[in-house]
Amino acid sequence: MEGMRRTVIVTGMHRSGTSAVAGMLSAATEIEFGQVNRQYLADAPRGNYENVSVVDINEELIGGWKTPRVPRDVPRATLERIEATVAREYPYREGVIYGIKDPRFLFTLDVWRPYLGKLSILRVWRPPHQVMASLQRRELSIYGREMSDIEAGDIISRYMERHEALDDVADCVDFDATTLAQVAAWCERNDIRFHEQAAEAFYSRQLVHHR
């Protein structure tokens, strides 16, 4: 009989440092993130650590990352697609801890929860004014359009509401100069070995500055 899968979810507002934290966990622990983007991206210089299949489902569930909603009455076909995706991308293997990163999990976590086994949730927090500035920089530098404070503020408020809704079920780390130490402490509390030297090699002040 198959045992229980163990899964770590990394989530938080877009541009809050979720890619950096997921990358650090991938580099410094035994958590396996599987088939994710680890290559340079203009908005994530060391990769965004997202699984395309997971993101596609989540984007469909919330109706787009800029105007997200909590999904209701999810079709059976979508649930079957989630179950199949988990079985394919994160097959049960004894002793393995899987990691899945996507900011959209703030909205969709309850839909995925029945399929993920023993679940640990790690949110990443960054001050809203820093998130706004990062969103606007990315929109202008990559897509060539200006994002107004009103548009950015609306996106942030939607994600902040969901971030706070997980206070009772999810841990949280701040995205700043102390992130490495906070992640190390979180790993210790969750019985996950953390290799500080590997984490330092991945994470840097330059990475924080870039974002």
Image (cartoon, rainbow, N blue to C red):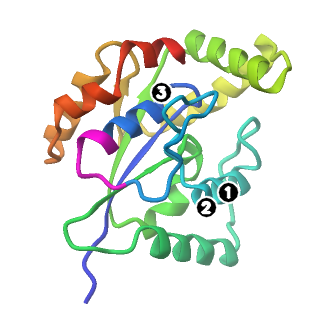
Which quadrant does the N terminus fall into? Answer: bottom left
- Quarter-of-image position of residue 190: top left
- Residue at image x 46%, y 76%? 87
- Tell me the distance, in whole angstroms, between the alpha carbons under discs 2 and 3: 21 Å
- Residue numbers of the magenta segment: 26-32
Image spot of residue 135 (x, y percent)? 67, 20
Q: CA distance from mark 1 to mark 2?
A: 5 Å
Mark 2 sits on what residue? Answer: 53
Q: Position of residue 121 (x, y in %)?
A: 36, 45
- Mark 1 is on which residue type? Asp
Which residue occupies the extreme bottom position in the image? Answer: 1
Is residue 27 on the magenta stretch? Answer: yes
Which of 64/196 is in front?
A: 196
User: Residue 40 location, x and y as percent?
Assistant: 56, 35
Label pair 1/2, CB-CB below 8 angstroms: yes
Residue under label 1, please give it: 56
- Figure check: 179 above or below 115: above
Amino acid at dot 3: Gly
Image: 35 above or below 20: below
The front one of 118 and 42 is 42
Dots 1 and 3: beta carbons under 8 Å? no
Q: Is residue 196 magenta?
A: no
| Residue sitting farthest toward the right | 145
Q: Residue at left 49%, top 43%?
A: 38
Alpha carbon of mark 1 to alpha carbon of mark 3: how far? 20 Å
Task: Check the image and report above or below for 114 versus 36.
Answer: below
- Mark 1 surroundings within 10 Å by alpha-carbon count, few (fewer than 14), some (14 through 19), many (20 or more): few
- In the image, taking residue 190 as reference, residue 105 lies left or right, namely right
Three-letter amino acid code at disc 2? Answer: Ser
Q: Secondary structure at mark 3?
A: loop
